[in-house]
Amino acid sequence: MGEAQLLSLAVCGGTLDLAHSHQQQHHFYKSCCIWSSNWSGRRSSSVSRLKKHGLLGSEGLFRKKRLSKELISRRLTSKMADYKEKSITADVTSGDMIFQPILEDGIFRFDCSANDRDAAYPSLSFINSKDRDKPITGHKVPLYTPTFECLLGRQIVKIELPAGTSFYGTGEVSGQLERTGKRVFTWNTDAWGYGPETTSLYQSHPWVLALLPNGEALGVLADTTQRCEIDLRKESKIQFVAPSSYPVITFGPFSSPTDVLRSLSHAIGSVFMPPKWSLGYHQCRWSYNSDKRVLEIANTMREKGIPCDVIWMDIDYMDGFRCFTFDKDRFPNPKSLVNDLHQNGFKAIWMLDPGIKHEEGYFVYDNGSKSDAWIQKADGRPFVGEVWPGNCVFPDFTQSKVRSWWARLVKDFISNGVDGIWNDMNEPAVFKSVTKTMPESNIHKGDDELGGCQNHSHYHNVYGMLMARSTYEGMKLANENKRPFVLTRAGFTGSQRYAATWTGDNLSNWDHLHMSISMVLQLGLSGQPLSGPDVGGFAGNATPMLFGRWMGVGAMFPFCRGHSETGTIDHEPWSFGEECEEVCRLALKRRYRLIPYIYTLFYMAHTVGTPVAMPTFFADTKDPSLRKLENSFLLGSVLVYASTMRDQGLDKLDWTIPNGTWLRFDFDDSHPDLPALYLQGGSIIPSGPPHQHVGAASPSDDLTLLVALDEHGKAEGVLFEDDGDGYEFTRGEYLLTHYVAEIQASVVTVRVSKTEGLWKRPKRRLHVQLLLGGGAMLESWGMDGEVLQIMMPSEQEVYKLVSASEKKYRTCLERAKRIPDAEEVSGQRGIELSRTPIELKSGCWILKVVPWIGGRIISMTHLPSGMQWLHSRVDINGYEEYSGTEFRSAGCSEEYSVIERNLEHAGEDESIMLECDISGGLILQRKIYIPKKNPKIFKIDSSIIARKVGAGSGGFSRLVCLRVHPMFTLLHPTESFVSFTSIDGTKHEVWPESGEQFYEGNQLPNGEWVLIDKCIGLGLVNRFNVNEVFKCLIHWGTGTVNLELWSEDRPVSKQSPLSISHEYEVIEIP
């Protein structure tokens, strides 16, 4: 054994039985080198294919060091030290998986073999890993048995379900609600400005909820922490691909998706019981940069009568971004600040990141170093990566001693008056890294019950969850009589036990508003009910209408927080004019009226595992027309129907209402920019006064019950009440009231049918609103706890009431002060990011183009593979073109005019022609098109044209260069490279560690180069005319690569423009 191997063994603090080293080496190779081994197994055919395209030489795809036995041995010993030997299946096996019933009836664990069952790592998703490993005696057998194939380290699991099955879940994912046709990869990623085709976001939930054609539901969990591909591209088929070996857990089929989610909660745990104040509105910004600004925001909320409970402090409150510190100039006395906020009814939430500044003398760094708290490199030294403070070390939360160390820091931090903690950047994100995170070879000295000492690839996806757990435990340690509130960006299946979440760094545009509904629902369908987006969008400047509409629907989400990025205009509710401010006020008053109901929903979610926000199809799982609805959702039994399209207010929506009785209601607050609300027949929901903050409510407040009778004339509902914080409710200190309503002989009786808990009923008035339809209602007052009766009028009188109410409703919408449809919003950036890109869709491609900022392509999606090769923010990066050798020279950010637009359905190539004036009489012209004759490719023809060059210059322009600058997104950065054959016949493989490389002359690619992702077996080929291209540049960034084409550098005239014509095509690499 070499010195490096011995050093790696020492890192894990154990010894390796050399007699078993071959077996352990085999196990490591299977479980950690999944993609490399798979590629290696197909190497010969892959090489042949690439040689066919002239992209590889005889040396093949792998650099020799990637296949060296020494390297593999070094990595395996690092990973497997102090972990007992396990047997696994042969390199190539397949068949039906074997099963055991576990936990309760209807839950089955599947493994490839008995040996694989023994070889599986502990479960980090289950509350108790032993529940997954302990079989029970059950009478049921699974209706659907997965098949498997184990091939060179990959375990491929397939489940075939009946035709017409719909797919949901898959955790935090963007794009459409119904997931058929989609593929995602569970790998927690800092995904700023993600789009609908982004395949890896901040959280990992290897979980699929299948809704069968008959309305029954089945849940499937691939219980692995490692990178997992969830492939739903084939109709009614689920496929998981991840390193061997891992079990698959199925839940059901059960009669409804709610039953599946209840069953899932018994395995992975239910959501923590949130403090009641956390269900109010939260106001945040990156950043409120002083205590004075924080108090100004809080005071303005109260002055304007806009309900709000929480103000958030982003990273700038710290001293030089050092966690657990405060800037002495801008936040000199955090306790005093918090006291002032508390007196005004506000809570304060503060950010803590995992990156700890690498600085001697900084107490957290010094203390953590003494405690051996940091994640280490394979050589045993702490890993140092750059984040906001500069060079940082990272706590190893896989160790109980480190979690306890962090919890003690949190306990001390809470003494400053901290009410909640925000864990950000905990994927973990690392700057200036191609992968956007730390090396997968880093070492975690994990506890045995978590999986022992492993490399980072094993623990990456659970790092954020373990950090949130440590923070949660630290808050409980600080005060056992208060419920912690933690918000985490990164998470995993099971993180709902410790933290709420939000949908990350979204964009201020209509696509992201629409997408936010599906994203919140998918998280709920994956076991995380406490989530919401950054209302108004994080990046970019919202318009008044966009912000108002977003607040309208956001106020109905389980978690409601407004948040915006530094450098954007203000995004507080009053920042967009009086009309938008009023809509925001109405929306948040709605939320605060419904706080008793939302709090009750969370009590049920916590105790029973039921969802809080659900897709509309939950109302009728057998109705296929409901399965793809994306602008409505259920908040318990309330149907929320929202307008997420810029040109459609509430009064212009075409509504799809589920079968049964649904009665519209409002709080005399209907507005074209607010959602419509319907209560399901058979339901009773509680509401209260719209206080300015949750703490202003009193048990003696008037209680309102909204009642919607079903077709049988009955309704029921519950109300949960307790102190709103603490854990006395677990000891019976609460009141759970079951209300029922029933009509008999034209009299509707509303009464208490049952109560639970030790609390006595408060003395308060009861206000019953019996919904009739069309917004009409009958009202009656009494005392809560007493029987209350309402006499029903005749059918003719009911008809008159409903007609009058509908007329009043239409009049209200017509007279409402609508939010102006202002496209342009001035601000620090001077750029409007909410306009809708132009979409080119034909053949194999969907392209999105923004003419108004650089004419850039911001999205490049290959439809057959579902791969999004390029995705960028609106105002920078993506596909750009410059008119000089200087970075971001003219043509990059100017507004382009659309001078021609052809559509495929009109018989033309799908195309767009753009022009931009780059001064000096020059025009940068670009045609982007998808040829009908060959829809596998798309082409770009670009030119710098001298249109008005003066005669005094001899008809020649200034010196210009056409520089094509596309920035491609790397799904698997460490497994991606660029391959080409140069003009002189030299074969090149360019990997991320090469940094930036120029090629010109005979070293220039001979007309094409290819960006290869060997994990998924695809290559993006870029072909060009070598007579037009004089220089090529490869630049590797953080999760990106630029493949640039440069023309020659010269003046142009009307007779001698500069041009580059090139095309893109995706090829398979078998």
Image (cartoon, rainbow, N blue to C red):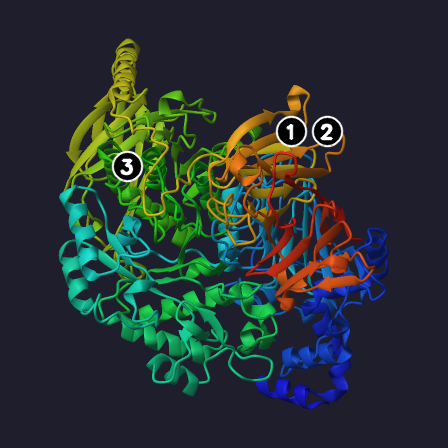
Query: In the image, which disc is placed on residue 910?
Result: 1
Q: Secondary structure at mark 3?
A: helix
Where is residue 115? Give x, y as percent.
Answer: 73, 69
Where is residue 913? Give x, y as percent.
Answer: 59, 31
- Answer with left or right where residue 303 lies relative to residue 377: left
Q: Nearer the viewer, residue 320 or 127?
A: 320
The quarter of the displayed image where residue 651 is located: top left
Q: Amino acid at mark 2?
A: Lys
Say whether marks 1 and 2 touch (CB < 8 Å): yes
On the image, numbered disc 3 is attached to which residue? Answer: 587
Where is residue 248? Give x, y as percent.
Answer: 65, 57
- Above or below 576: residue 91: below
Q: Amino acid at mark 3?
A: Ala
First in residue order: circle 1 vs circle 2: 1
Query: In the image, which disc is placed on residue 932?
Result: 2
Let me know if residue 124 appears in the view: no
Q: Amino acid at mark 1?
A: Glu
Q: CA distance from mark 3 to mark 1?
A: 42 Å
